[in-house]
Amino acid sequence: MRAGELAAVRMRLEVFASEVFAPLVRRDQREKGALYLRGLLLDGRRKSMQPMAERLGVDHQQLQQFMTSSTWAVQDVQSRLAWRAVASVRPQVWVVDDTGFPKDGRCSPGVARQYSGTLGKVGNCQIGVSVHAASDTASCPLSWRLFLPPAWDGPEAAARRRACRIPEAEHHRPKWQLALDMLDELAATGLRPAVLVADTGYGANADFRRGLEDRGLAYVLQAKGEMTAHGEQAAPHQPAYSGLGPRPLPRYRTSPCSLREHVLTAGRDSGRAVSWRKGSKAAMSSHFVFLRVRLAGRRPKPADDGTIPLVWLIAQWPEGESEPVKYWISNLPAGMPAKDLVRLAKARWRIEHDYRELKTALGLDHFEGRSFNGWHRHVTLVTAAHLFLSEQRTSPKAPART
């Protein structure tokens, strides 16, 4: 926003900031939170603390102290933002994803040479895992976690951990586990998704799928064609059960085959054309095949009768292609309409708008501090700025949690 545009919504921003930062006990912390928020919203090439302070006309030490050494709890602000975002966005799905933060050097918390979808290759970067609320018209992050690679554990990392003030309890955990942790924390505040969607980095992970099922969450997850499954009519043989310990999984008389093979066997003609949303010029449409399968591989969660439950296999097979180009799996009910399955599978597109605005306009990846807590505070306040802008575009009087 230009200075004049920000001045025009100053009263709205002050009300928004007073509600978002209400959990902060100290008045000076609430004031600095509002100041940082204004700095993120003001136009400027860099949204790190010193350039923001110059645009705001304040000493950048005020912002630095608030972000790095102050004692306020980011979780309280995150929770309030999440409730407000859900009320504003009215999400059809929640989306789990991650994004890269390119970095120079090795001193920023969590930085390592690792693959980043942002870079499209292995590079020196941080990775942030996020959970978003999304509808067809709006979306907003609900929570963030900084991924700590294995190199940030162990005695050789002790000096770097101290320099970055990484809490003793924070260690390497896979990205899918960070996502489940965030879902648990959001659930503890009373927020749960109607349906959760994610890309293959999460959908192809059996432990992540099992974690969602254990939590009773519905999902539509992108999958790899190489994943294996039994067909709908596969006949199981149930091993004898002694009554001691867990019930043994059924042994199917036929070997599982890949999702790709299941769809190729069914053929493209077994599917149908489906439109899932309006594009800028025409409706988004493609050809899809829908099958019911029983996922094989590691850790399938058996049904009450000991059999592996049926799930949806959704394959996008456009005209002119010799085989499907994308696959999804879903534990939604058998009677789910095909159009709804596709619409949910394709819902991830919305958060690309999040990442674009969060990075290009609001400085999500501009944080130059080397504090673990500072990183989480920065991305949380960037989320607050993003939510404020979203509310101005949709419903300026969106309710907050009381």
Image: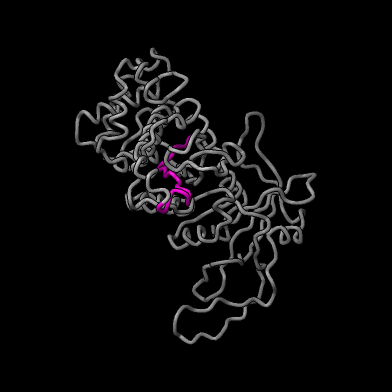
Color encoding of the figure: one colour
Is 45 situated above or below 329?
Answer: above
Residue 108 in the image, given as x and y percentages of width and height: 43, 37
Q: Eyeballing the image, is 40 above or below 401?
A: above
Quadrant assignment, res 161: top left
Name the residue at the left extreme. Answer: 26
Q: Quadrant of the N terminus?
A: top left
Residue 21 horizontal side relative to residue 105, left or right: left
**Where are the magenta residues, as a range?**
138-155
Q: Residue at horizontal 36%, vertical 38%?
A: 371
> Which residue sits at x=51%, y=61%?
207
Which residue is found at the position 68% from the left and 59% from the top?
259
Query: Magenta stretch: residue 337 in it?
Result: no
In the figure, is residue 151 to the left or right of 281?
Answer: left
Residue 320: x %, y % from top left: 80, 44
* Above or below for 195 versus 213: above
- Residue 19 at x, y = what percent? 27, 33
Q: In this view, does 120 lie to the left or right of 130?
A: right
Q: Toward the viewer: 248 or 236?
A: 248
Please state the horizontal and vertical placement of residue 18, each as a whole percent of the image: 26, 30
Residue 175 vs residue 109, the one in the foreground: 109
The one nearer the camera, 100 or 19, is: 100
How many marks are shown on the rendered structure? 0
From what the image shows, is residue 130 above or below residue 4? Answer: below
Choose top left, top right, bottom left or bottom right for residue 310.
Answer: bottom right
Residue in the picture at 29% in, 42% down: 76
The quadrant of the picture occupied by the C terminus is top left
